[in-house]
Image: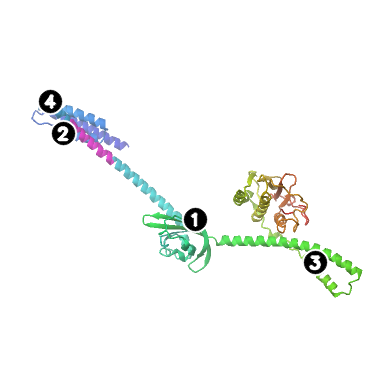
Amino acid sequence: MVPGYLEANSRVILAAGLIAAIALVDSRVDAPISFGFLYLLPMFLVGTVWRRWQILGTAAVCTALADMFDAFHFMWSVTVPQDILVFSALGGAGLFAFEITARRRHERLHLEEVEQESAARKAAEEQLEFLIDSSPAAILTMDADFAILRANAAAHRLLGVAPGKLPGRIVHRYIPALARVPSIRQNGQAFRTGMQCRGERENREVFLASVFFSTYQTAVGPRLAALVVDASEELREREESNLEQMLAGSRILMGAVSHEIRNVCGAIAVSYENLARAGALRDNQDFEALGSLVETLNTVASLELRQSAADSRASGGDLAEILGDLRIVLEPYCQEADIDVHWEVEESLPPVWVDRHRLLQVLLNLVKNSARALEGAAEKRMDIQVSAGRGIVSIRVADSGPGIVSSEKLFQPFQRGAESTGLGLYISRAFMRSFRGDLRYDPALPGCSFVIELAVAGSPVDNHPQAGQHGSNSTVTTR
């Protein structure tokens, strides 16, 4: 700014000097020559610096000087039009220089803005290119014929192709499901979606691909961009977790079945001993065979499938994160059922001993039980309260339903009148006890209220909810 200011002042000083010099020469030279045209030069200089009114004022001064020292003396009828013509010429020259300078200044500013935008765009492109090249996810761009235009390093690694060899190849060879995407050349509709499908590497190895793709328009035609992630490990972990949950549930179920069979076998054994003691069927071979069958069945039922300590995958976990997963699953489900859910969660909950998958299944089972109970209720409300106590974190799931008529056999399997086999709460309690937790029914509140108790991570074993109080026969049926 300072150099420009000095340059402007220099032009003004030079213009003032020229005006003074021209006026001095015009006053000293006594010849029939008019020097008024020389004022055009200082007017050009003034026009590059000053504003319009200043230019016109300078033109008026120059016109007055030219008229004052003019060697020719005319009548007023001639002098006035002549002065107007001189003023117009000088003012027009100054304004012409002003407009040219203003346009050049505007073009210079516009050029600077373009250069700044170009530099910013270049920096953004460099950052985007670095982000794409360093991304752990495979990123592909394709033309309207699904030919790969560009692929980052992660895409070459994922598809097992040598670096730089993917451009030019058809993407359907590696992601066949993209062949079902409508042609972006014929269909101008934009797509922005994702899918899970089968992917294939260069060596024909198959993997599960999570593909997120979108279409967009460019100056050279439509384009398709896809982000591909290998979800095979996630699939394996999910299937292994499902298998472990199924095995754990099967062990609990078989334990319940064995318990019921033992009860039946015990009753049959008593009847068999009474008949044998009476002696009426002592030599009957079918009766002896029946006794052997009952003894064998009782022996099989005695082989309880207990869950070992190694079966539990409990560890110190963040309960708030698990509750967040529950809300993601629960809230759309409750919205469809018109159930009003209220959450009361204390802040800064301590870490607890928990198996997140089993706890999530227990919570979902309780919520679905409440949803069934609220189907015919006038008020459909569910309250989930989480609070921390001494060595225990409690999760209360309560609803405004009609409640449970009889809670004497609430957690026993194979009950009369229960939904399906009546194993929901039985397995839920077994899941909770597998990682030092407990599930109990609280009849003190109106409606139906269940309480999940979790041991705080790091608390003594004596303080956890199930220590020394869990027997095989619990007082608390499935809904």
Question: Alpha carbon of mark 3 to alpha carbon of mark 1: how far?
Answer: 58 Å
Query: Is residue 324 located in the magenta-colored stretch of the structure?
Result: no
The disc placed on residue 193 is: 1
Q: Residue at (50%, 57%) from the top-left corner?
A: 194
> Magenta residues?
85-104
Q: Earlier in the sequence, mark 2 or mark 1?
A: 2
Q: Which residue is mark 4?
A: 77
- Percent across and percent down for residue 159 are 48, 64
Q: In the figure, residue 12 lies in which quadrant?
A: top left
Q: Is residue 239 above or below residue 54?
A: below
Given residues 243 and 221, the one toward you in this image is 221
Q: Which residue is mark 3?
A: 298
Q: Earlier in the sequence, mark 3 or mark 1?
A: 1
Identified by mark 2, the residue type is Leu
Is 119 placed left or right of 101 in the picture?
right
Q: Which residue is mark 2?
A: 38
Question: Alpha carbon of mark 1 to alpha carbon of mark 4: how far?
Answer: 85 Å
Given residues 437 and 22, the one toward you in this image is 437
Look at discs 3 and 1 and give the one toward the viewer.
1
